[in-house]
Amino acid sequence: MVAPSVLHLNPDKYDDPLAFNPWRWEGKELHAGSKTFMAFGGGVRLCVGADFAKLQMAIFIHHLISNYRWTVVKGGDIIRKPGLVFPNGLHVKITKKQELY
Ligand code: HEM
């Protein structure tokens, strides 16, 4: 049985687990097989909205790529293992593209 909250609220894994701290995963391995993070839960209680949420993220990224110009500021080294990993981050500046009409 998988109980994501037992993992995510475990003070041995995360300092002050009840605090809102989006940086808590910085430097940790975040991939499908991660032992410290399960974004959509797992097992029989796997998030039923996971595919819907991923579709919304894909549509959002599509609009960001189609309508905005991305300029790399720093980072960008890529490791394929097999998913993409940016070991030193990928900092980009995003500016709205000029309207052509
Ligand atoms: C980025 C967006 C989302 C994240 C990170 C997320 C995360 C999670 C996690 C971690 C669980 C498991 C909770 C547990 O095991 O106690 C869960 C369950 C659930 N999620 Fe999501 N969720 C997201 C979006 C959605 C959406 C869009 C819907 C509905 C349209 C949804 C509906 C549900 C439902 C109904 C459950 C309970 C499933 C069950 O207990 O059988 N979620 N979600």
Image (spheres, helix red, strand yellow):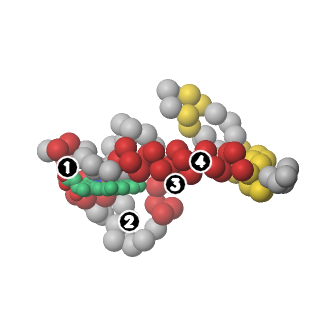
Mark 2, ligand 1, within 8 Å: the answer is no
- Across and down, in percent, residue 83 comes to 50, 31
Q: Residue at x 63, y 49 (%)?
A: 63
Mark 1, ligand 1, within 8 Å: the answer is yes
Mark 4, ligand 1, within 8 Å: the answer is no
Q: Residue at x 34, y 71 (%)?
A: 18
Residue for badge 4? 61
Find the distance from the CA under tag 3 to the CA under tag 2.
Answer: 13 Å
Q: Amino acid at mark 3?
A: Glu
Q: Quick check: marks 2 and 1 in contact, CB under 8 Å?
A: no
- Across and down, in percent, residue 36 comes to 35, 49
Q: Amino acid at mark 2?
A: Asp
Circle nearer the N terminus (4, 2): 2
Find the distance from the CA under tag 4 to the CA under tag 3.
Answer: 22 Å
Q: Residues within 10 Å of mark 1 (few under 14, many from 20)?
A: few
Mark whose residue sits in front, 1 or 3: 1
Q: How many marks?
A: 4
Circle nearer the N terminus (2, 1): 2
Q: Measured along the vertical axis of the image, is residue 11 above or below residue 2?
A: below
In the picture provided, is 2 more to the left or to the right than 87? left
Find the distance from the CA under tag 4 to the CA under tag 2.
Answer: 32 Å
Q: Which mark is residue 26?
A: 3
Find the distance from the CA under tag 1 to the CA under tag 3.
Answer: 26 Å
Q: Is residue 36 visible?
A: no
Q: Secondary structure at mark 1?
A: helix
Q: Amino acid at mark 1?
A: Arg
Mark whose residue sits in front, 4 or 3: 4
Q: Secondary structure at mark 3?
A: loop
Q: Which mark is residue 45?
A: 1
- Across and down, in percent, residue 29 comes to 45, 43
Name the residue nearer the viewer: 58 or 5: 58
Q: Name the image quarter holding residue 86.
A: top right
